[in-house]
Amino acid sequence: VVIGVPAIYLANVRANVPKTIGVAAQNCWKVEKGAFTGEISAPMIKDVGVDWVILGHSERRTIFGESDQLVADKVANALQHGLKVIACIGETLEERESEKTEEVVFRQTKALVPAIGDNWKNVVLAYEPVWAIGTGKTASPQQ
């Protein structure tokens, strides 16, 4: 079990939940240091005792326009700094209705492969069908 919380609460949650429960930041930037106002780096996450980060979440992809390559860069940096990664993949409603689910999910996963290398033991892929979030449509077991 891993709980993903906003950055401001990471230290508090880590201090108050059992060590058997993982705590994840909801994002981190692709470099260790530099000018990235409002972002958090992988070393900052590690500094508060957190070992997980969620990257590629649909909200980051749609609201902030994060590309597959940016997500891959973030994954590579997080792994380089010893974080475990929950990498999110999934298609939008438009992509689903255009029967592009496999194409989109394959493209997103393919972008991650070089970033992960032989470090798959520290990565969890989370399939998150974007079309099933906030649309009133639900995913069936077959989907």
Image (cartoon, rainbow, N blue to C red):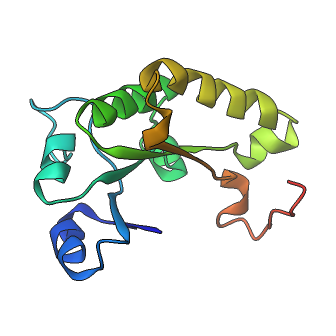
The reply, left or right, for residue 133 in relation to residue 69 is right
Pick whichever, 85 or 56, lies toward us. Answer: 85
> x, y percentage for residue 128?
64, 53
Residue shown at the point (21%, 29%) measured from the top left: 31
Looking at the picture, does residue 131 appear above or below residue 113?
A: below
Q: Residue at x 43, y 23 (%)?
A: 115
- In front of the other: 126 or 19: 19
Does residue 49 appear anywhere in the picture? yes
Q: Does residue 41 appear in the picture of this structure?
A: no
Q: Is residue 96 above or below residue 112?
A: below
In this picture, residue 115 sits left or right of residue 31: right
Q: Residue at x 86, y 43 (%)?
A: 97
What is the tally of numbered marks visible in this picture? 0
How far across and down, in percent of the image, does residue 79 sit?
33, 34
Question: Which quadrant holds residue 119?
Answer: top left
The single residue placed furthest to the bottom in the displayed view is 16
Q: Residue furthest top?
A: 114
User: Is residue 10 shown left or right of residue 55?
Assistant: left
Q: Residue at x 80, y 66 (%)?
A: 137
- Residue 73: image x %, image y %? 37, 25
Quadrant where the C terminus lies? Answer: bottom right
- Picture coordinates of residue 38 (x, y %)? 17, 48
Q: Nearer the viewer, residue 17 or 12?
A: 17
The part of the image, by quadrant, that contains residue 35 is top left
Tell whether 10 sits left or right of 124.
Answer: left
